[in-house]
Amino acid sequence: MPRRPIDITMPDLTGQRAVVTGASDGMGLGTAARLAAAGAEVIMPVRNPGKGEAAIARIRSATPHAEVSLRGLDLSSLDSVAALGDTLRGEGRPIDILINNAGVMRPPGRQTTVDGFELQFGTNHLGHFALVGHLLPLLRAGRARVTSQISVAARRGAINWDDLNWERSYHGMRAYGQSKIAFGLFGLELDRRSAAHGWGITSNLSHPGVAPTGLLAARPELGRSEDTPHIRLIRALSARGILLGTLETAKLPALMAATAPDAARGALYGPGGPGGLGGPPAKQRLYPPLRSTEEAARVWRASEELTKVSFPAA
């Protein structure tokens, strides 16, 4: 049976500046394309300029007058994150929308970032934490909405406080879950601190459900030379319309969270189908590991210490 089309209505974003990490392919590319088609100026910070140029060509083939451009960013390097912050602050343009979408998932063995952090924790969480810190003046100037992409992997598990970098007991999936729990706690704490200190930023969370994104596909740069069995199964189920989402539907929760006029601050958006795996985007109940304000504050303090990036109170 053919799938029923699933989509959302995008508001007019003319005059707004949006930044989308991980926009050179897959779900991030689709997100950037929809923002550009709605009139936003879209900044695409990428690690691979060649992939970035190809992504821009695809966007402009569908929206010839799209206002899209590349900047350099490697979220696994805090120096690269700081350099992007310097670049965008130097441009002096307020940011209206920030979608923290980029991520890595389950490299075949424990790997570390340039700065020595476990790769998933360092890239998915700490890199984005530092990015928001460096962009804070521009986000405040734009009274921005910040949407951080987490995962169904954050439904269970906890922060491994005794071994944050998984040096003694590495488990790829648990480390991935920790990175997304920490990232979700940060996104919620960002909204609380913004409200408390008058930053003018609203922050919420999204997750794409389960869809055939590139997270588990072949990634030679991560040491994964071929697709995992998991991504092959996900593709097969998605293509048959069985329970899971598609690349087209997976981007919709983040777009809703980032652009819908009635999207709630401090909320989670994801697919509204069974188990939150696929279906139309909808507001969802926060996962249990994301509900502790004490844990969120602890993640914030630890992230400031690890990245050496601090957020001024006023």
Image (cartoon, rainbow, N blue to C red):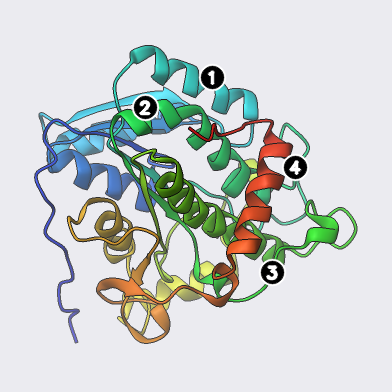
Q: Earlier in the sequence, mark 3 or mark 2?
A: 2
Query: Could you tell me which secondary element the residue under label 2 belongs to?
Result: helix
Locate residue 242, reporting x and y percent: 35, 84
Callout 3 amino acid: Ala
Spatial separation of the CA atoms under disc 2 and disc 4? 27 Å
Callout 4 amino acid: Phe
- Label drawn at residue 138: 2
Spatial separation of the CA atoms under disc 3 and disc 1? 32 Å
- Label drawn at residue 83: 1
Classify the position of the N terminus by image quarter.
bottom left
Residue count near mark 3 (Cα–Cα under 10 Å), binned few <14, some 14–19, many ≥20: some
- Residue at label 3? 158
Spatial separation of the CA atoms under disc 3 and disc 4? 18 Å
Circles 4, 1 touching at the beta carbon (< 8 Å): no
Q: Earlier in the sequence, mark 4 or mark 1?
A: 1
Residue count near mark 1 (Cα–Cα under 10 Å), binned few <14, some 14–19, many ≥20: some
Locate residue 138, reporting x and y percent: 37, 27
Locate residue 66, reporting x and y percent: 15, 31
| Depth check, front residue: 238 or 94 | 94
- Residue at label 4? 117
Callout 2 amino acid: Leu
| Depth check, front residue: 182 or 213 | 182
Query: Could you tell me which secondary element the residue under label 4 belongs to?
Result: loop
Query: Could you tell me which secondary element the residue under label 1 belongs to?
Result: helix
Q: Earlier in the sequence, mark 1 or mark 2?
A: 1
The answer to whether residue 183 shows anywhere in this view is yes
Query: Could you tell me which secondary element the residue under label 3 belongs to?
Result: loop
